[in-house]
Image (cartoon, helix red, strand yellow):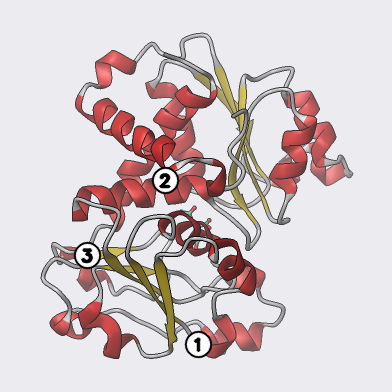
């Protein structure tokens, strides 16, 4: 495997191995501090990011490697009209591995065809976000002790939310998964995600608009932001943006061991008062994401 563009490119045993490695890194960081000495990671971010870009950079530094890159399209030659292919052919001359975020669906795939070094998809438009999913799986495994036999509620913008698309693809391969997809009618899970997982026999998908009604059934609640930047008109965004706001009062009927997750950034969809609830896991997801990216960088660079 050269690149990671889509979570389906990883086998279940590769995912399990990455989770195991990330736990080992967390417990024994010194063992890994020189693993990528002399190697360089380039972060090519054509779209805004805080966690994904900085966690890739922190991951490479903690492996003893170095980092270069840009954090906005307008500070790169993309602003002059350079193609993604030419950009990554160029960066392949400077770096050993590239993490790339782009507003166009499929851009990291095109980049992987042109690049001579591994490409990691750090989010492409409203399509996929495989490394967020690695952070999410690691978090679910740690919090619930398993990745099978779970009822997972995904709530918010399921249409444009790329983290949900990759999460559903990854979780559907585990046994006995029940997804409850909670969204306004206009923001339902796209057909392409459903058809990509249809061959995994052992999952169920239900759809509802009512978070309160299904909340008591959930083992995991994955909240998401309404993806303002993907809307065609502002009026629709304003109408839909506050469809769901999780508050301590709404959580009174939820399971005592519910894991409340969110890929972040949050806008309004989780009240800050929920942060003190021991079931809130979203900042743990951030930390797990760094260790998972360390494990992934080592895997793609074939570091022992
Ligand atoms: C997500 C993304 O970029 O898709 N953020 C992240 O990478 N953690 C979610 C979002 O922007 O809403």
Residue closest to the eye, 157 or 147: 147
Circle 2 is placed at which residue position? Answer: 134
Residue 1 percent across, percent down from the top left: 59, 29
Distance in Å between CA atoms under marks 2 and 1? 27 Å
**Would you place residue 7 above or below residue 117 in this image?**
below
Q: Residue at x 32, y 46 (%)?
A: 138
Q: Position of residue 85 (x, y in %)?
A: 82, 36
**Mark 2 lies within 8 Å of ligand 1 (Cβ measured):** no
Q: If you read the primary sequence from the N terminus, does the residue marked by circle 2 or circle 3 appear first?
A: 2
| Cβ atoms under marks 2 and 1 closer than 8 Å | no
- Residue at image mark 3: 275
Q: Can the viewer see residue 291 in this picture? A: no
Q: Residue at x 53, y 25 (%)?
A: 300
Q: CA distance from mark 2 to mark 3?
A: 22 Å
Q: Which residue is mark 1?
A: 184
Residue 278 % position (x, y): 13, 62
Residue farthest to the left?
256
Q: Earlier in the sequence, mark 3 or mark 1?
A: 1
Question: Quarter-wise, where is residue 95 in the image?
Answer: top right
Across and down, in percent, residue 41 comes to 57, 25
Specify the quadrant of the image occupied by residue 63: top left
The residues tagged by marks 3 and 1 sit, at their Cα atoms, a distance apart of: 25 Å
């Amino acid at each position: 495997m050269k690149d990671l563009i889509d979570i389906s490119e990883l086998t279940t045993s590769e995912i399990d191995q990455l989770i195991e490695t990330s736990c080992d890194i967390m417990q024994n960081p010194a063992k890994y501090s020189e693993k990528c000495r002399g190697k360089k990671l380039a972060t090519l971010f054509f779209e805004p990011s805080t966690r994904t870009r900085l966690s890739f950079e922190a991951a490479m530094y903690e492996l003893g490697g170095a980092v270069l890159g840009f954090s906005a399209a307008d500070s790169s030659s993309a602003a002059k009209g350079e193609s993604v292919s030419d950009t990554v052919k160029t960066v392949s001359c400077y770096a050993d591995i590239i993490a790339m975020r782009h507003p166009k669906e499929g851009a990291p795939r095109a980049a992987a065809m042109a690049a001579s070094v591994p490409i990691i998809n750090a989010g492409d438009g409203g399509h996929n976000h495989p490394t967020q999913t690695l952070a999410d799986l690691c978090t679910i495994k740690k919090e619930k002790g398993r990745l099978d036999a779970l009822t997972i509620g995904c709530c918010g913008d399921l249409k444009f939310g790329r983290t949900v698309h990759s999460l559903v693809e990854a979780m559907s391969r585990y046994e006995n998964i029940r997804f409850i997809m909670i969204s306004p009618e206009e923001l339902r899970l796209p057909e392409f995600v459903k058809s990509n997982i249809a061959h995994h026999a052992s999952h169920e998908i239900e759809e509802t608009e009512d978070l309160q009604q299904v909340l008591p059934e959930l083992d995991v609640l994955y909240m998401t932001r309404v993806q303002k930047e993907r809307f065609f008109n502002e009026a629709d965004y304003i109408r839909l943006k506050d469809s769901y706001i999780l508050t301590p009062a709404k959580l009174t009927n939820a399971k005592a061991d519910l894991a409340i997750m969110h890929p972040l950034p949050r806008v309004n969809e989780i009240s800050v008062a929920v942060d003190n609830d021991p079931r809130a896991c979203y900042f743990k997801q951030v930390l797990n994401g760094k260790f998972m990216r360390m494990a992934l960088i080592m895997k793609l660079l074939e570091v022992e």
